[in-house]
Structures are given as structure tokens and as C-alpha cells.
Image (cartoon, rainbow, N blue to C red):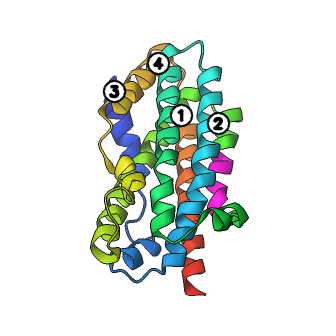
Amino acid sequence: MTRTARELLETITGKLAPDPHANRLLPLIGRGAAQRDTLAALAMEQRHVTDADRRAFLHLAQRSAAVPECAAFFTLLAEGEALAQDRLGPLLAACGADEARVAEYEPLAGAQAYPAYVAWLALNGEPVDVVLALSANFAAWGGDCATIAEALRRQYGFDDEACGFFDFFAEPAPDLEQQAVAAVQAGLDAGGIHEDEVHRYGRLLQSYESMFWHTLWELNQR
């Protein structure tokens, strides 16, 4: 039976769904047990992640010139990363990270493995396969951001502006979803989707995502 693009996205997202208990930092934030220094580190790591991912997505958009639907998807992602980065300032301030601290911060290897792999995908992955793998990963990321935004308000007293970064990723993104469906449909029509590669990309993205959170959890234990 021929699958639609939406069915393929839903199937792969389901198969790549992470263990809900794997993120050990999330429940600490949820009950207000994560240190503010850990929250500051989370925000400072995200400065590097969003900048690196924006550049990777722009490169993927350039590589997708022959498939306009893919190019539009990656362009939307790049624009989103830029918007998200603009929302990090109030979060950093709420965490007590001033400009000097941010400038001196040395990113952690375990937290930067994820954007390093996204950059690898930008150079080596077939764009439509990357669309599928990233879409599956974003489903979990959005849920985590919603949990964090709620906890920052309830447990840490952060205001809406300070929570804006996480609110941004927690919000539904129908335009991005529609563009992902269009990109995947274009791939199906051209017979250019490699599901084994998609699963490999998605599995590694999830692993590096888990590494990001675990690295910050370890930092919180010091």
C-alpha cells in the first residue's frame, strides 16, 4: 500500500520516540531542584546550539535548491533558530548570567555533540532524509520545552519574557509541519527517501539529544 507523506512522518516519529524517563534533568527542573547555575548553563549552551543549527539549516537549504519544498523547510528552521536566539537574553538575565559570564563561558563537549551532528548532516545527509529525521526529533524537543517553560514559571518565578525561548519551541508550528509534509511528499514522488538512513540519522539525533541533557544533569550534581 502506498503511504502518504504524513503517514510516513507519523510512523517514523513514533519509532524514534525517546524513552520518556531518559531525560534525568527534566524532572529536576520540574520540581525546582535544578540549580540556577545549571539553568544558566542550559541557556548558554543553547546560544551555541541555535547559532550552529541556524548555519547548518541554511546550508541544507542551499543544498536543496533542486527541491524547493525541502529548501523552504530548512529556511523556516533557520529563521526559527534566529528568532529563538533573540529570546535567550531575558532567560540568561533571569538565571543571573551577565554579559561577562556569557562571554567567558566554555561550552561542554557533551552538550555540543548534537549541533555537531546536525552540521554533519548538513554536509552529508540527503536533505529529504534529514527532514524526516529532524521532524521526529523536534516532536520530543517541543514537549520538553513546554515542561521547562511551565516549571520555570511555577518553581523559579520566571516571567513570560524569561520563558520566551522555551515557549517559542513549545508552541505548535503548523507552517513548519505543512512544509515538512510537502518536502517528504516531494521525496516520495521522486523515489528519493532512504528509510534506513532516516532511522540512523534519527537514532543518532536522539542519542545526542540525550547526551545534551545528561551532560547538564551531571553538571547539576557537582
Disc 1 crowd rating (10 Å Cα; few below 14, some 14-19, many 20+) is many
Going from the N terminus, do you reach mark 2 or mark 4 first?
2
Going from the N terminus, do you reach mark 3 or mark 4 first?
4
Reply yes or no: does residue 44 show up in magenta.
Answer: no
Q: Residue furthest front?
A: 99
Q: Amino acid under label 1? A: Ala
Disc 3 from disc 2: Cα separation: 22 Å
Q: In terms of secondary structure, what is the magenta stretch mainly? A: helix
Disc 1 from disc 3: Cα separation: 16 Å
Q: Which residue is mark 3?
A: 178
Tell me the tag on residue 78. 1
Q: Nearer the viewer, mark 3 or mark 2?
A: 2
Q: Tell me whether circle 4 and circle 1 mark residues in contact (CB < 8 Å).
A: no
Assign a secondary structure to mark 1. helix
Going from the N terminus, do you reach mark 1 or mark 3 first?
1
Q: Nearer the viewer, mark 2 or mark 4?
A: 2
Disc 2 crowd rating (10 Å Cα; few below 14, some 14-19, many 20+) is some
Q: Tell me whether circle 2 and circle 1 mark residues in contact (CB < 8 Å).
A: yes
Q: Residue furthest bottom?
A: 222
Q: Which residue is mark 4?
A: 69
Q: Which residue is mark 2?
A: 55
Residue 217: image x %, image y %? 53, 76
Q: Nearer the viewer, residue 199 or 90?
A: 90
Magenta segment: 111-117
Q: Amino acid under label 3? A: Gln
Q: Amino acid under label 2? A: Arg
Q: Nearer the viewer, mark 1 or mark 3?
A: 1
Give the quarter of the figure containing the N terminus: top left
Q: Amino acid under label 4? A: Glu
Q: Tell me whether circle 1 and circle 3 mark residues in contact (CB < 8 Å).
A: no
